[in-house]
Amino acid sequence: MVVINVLPEISMFDADLDEFSITGLEPHKDYFITLRTTHKNTFRSYARFRSDENGEIIVANSMAVHGHYSGYDRMGLFSSLYQEGTARFATKMSLNPLPEKLEYKIQVHEANVYAPGKVITEKSIYRILLSPNVERIVVDSAIDGVIFKPKGNGPFPAIIDIYGMLGAFEQRAALLAEKGFAVLALTVFGGKRTPKTWQQNESTYFLKAIDWILAQPYASKTVGVIGISAGGGACCYMASKHPKVSAVILLNSRGYPTVHSVFKENGKLLPLADTPLRRLIDTDCRQGAMNYAKTDDGLDVRDEIFYKIEDSNAKFLLVAGGQDGSQNSALNAKLIIERMSRLGKAENFEMLVLPNTGHNIEPPYVPVQDIGYAKNLDLIMDFGGHTYLQNVDQRKLWPKMIEFLKKNVPVEKAKL
């Protein structure tokens, strides 16, 4: 009898499996293994393997030779999930509202020449997004957002997580809370207390978010901030203005505002770097999706429009996707590093380039969205990124982010 062996059968969304194997197969024969999960839309991956002399496929030790990935990787199928062809174009795995867990169906197929054939057996496993040890609390205050924190009194390292133009998402906050952080997934636009667009926000909103989370009895005395894209710009502003910001993670972010990421200070838009019309001729289009990466090349960004992060004592981790199609993130991170070097603050900054990663950097095993809809811009964007290799990059980045936050957002031990 063919048996799919997976341990654990219920695991955290970002965790690696301990065992993934198929037994009871015919020896030395090719089979396909498919993985499928559905949450609003369906995502699927598959790969072709050959059973060994014992009629087994131990996924970690068996080479995937055809499919969504190749090589030896126990988590390869989870890392290469992509929207099914029947799904709506430019689909993202939208985890709002955040499901407690997702069902994943594993199937073993006979091998046709290039694709999976008849299903031999199947098994369902589950991946948890909201740990039973974590509580989700909707913020009822002057700010919009959701808190994810470990159950208990703390103190816990306080984190604010800000997504960019795609809107507010909760998966990173929920998974970080399982690691021991108290995380505010901050809504910036489109919420009950926030304007309809990013650009209508007042800078005081971001500073209020810091004051609010630090006032909670379970929070540390300083805060870390994480921002992707426009959210990273907000994080730079927060660090430059608030002395309690001790750690900043910028994911594909600029160190200065642009026409898309700018917001208001004292009722007026911040000075911004605008892309000259001559640069827009370098805009590319793929499958109807706009790629703006080349428009950053050669820009002369005035020093006075940079966020004054030199005024901050926080530690910065700058992460850039080498295949970002939304902007030239590696160049923008380099501009920050070069400026900080000139100002004698380079020791507080670390830069990391993920070579196969596009714009939307997520926790491990969130399917890569290489093309997607930017809600605030009303545009289909070419975000870039390799379907499988970006998740390999993200699997390496995730523990580094956690280590960085634990080191730079300390908590005092409770007194006995």
Image: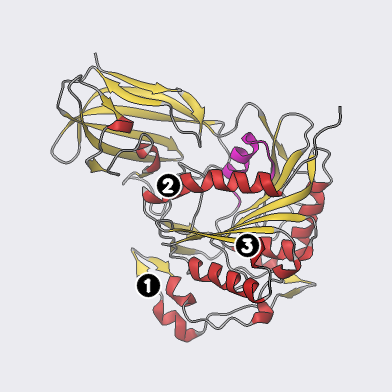
How many C-alpha atoms fall within 10 Å of the one at disc 1: few (<14), some, or many (≥20)? Answer: some
Q: Are marks 1 and 3 in contact (CB under 8 Å)?
A: no
Residue 189 is situated, as x and y percent measured from the top left of the image, at 66, 58
How many C-alpha atoms fall within 10 Å of the one at disc 3: few (<14), some, or many (≥20)? Answer: some
Of all residues, the one furthest to the top in this rendering is 1
Name the disc covering residue 284, or none: 1
Magenta stretch: includes residue 182: yes
Residue 33 is situated, as x and y percent measured from the top left of the image, at 27, 32
Alpha carbons under labels 2 and 1: distance apart: 25 Å
Q: Quadrant of the C terminus?
A: top right
Q: In this view, does 335 lie above or below 230?
A: below
Of all residues, the one furthest to the right in this rendering is 416
Q: Give the range drawn in magenta.
A: 168-183
Residue 260 is situated, as x and y percent measured from the top left of the image, at 58, 70
What residue is disc 2 on? 391
Answer left or right for 366 relative to 271: left
Q: Which secondary structure, mark 1?
A: strand
Q: Is residue 327 at least partly visible in the picture?
A: no
Q: Are marks 2 and 1 in contact (CB under 8 Å)?
A: no
**Kind of residue sitting beneath label 1:** Asp
Magenta stretch: includes residue 262: no
Q: Where, by quadrant of the figure, is residue 263 drawn?
A: bottom right
Q: Which numbered disc, 3 or 2, marks the residue that appears first in the sequence?
A: 3
What residue is disc 3 on? 349
Q: Which numbered disc, 1 or 3, marks the residue that appears first in the sequence?
A: 1
Q: Quadrant of the N terminus?
A: top left
Residue 156 is situated, as x and y percent measured from the top left of the image, at 74, 38
Alpha carbons under labels 1 and 3: distance apart: 32 Å
Q: Where, by quadrant of the figure, is residue 307 drawn?
A: bottom right
**Kind of residue sitting beneath label 3:** Phe
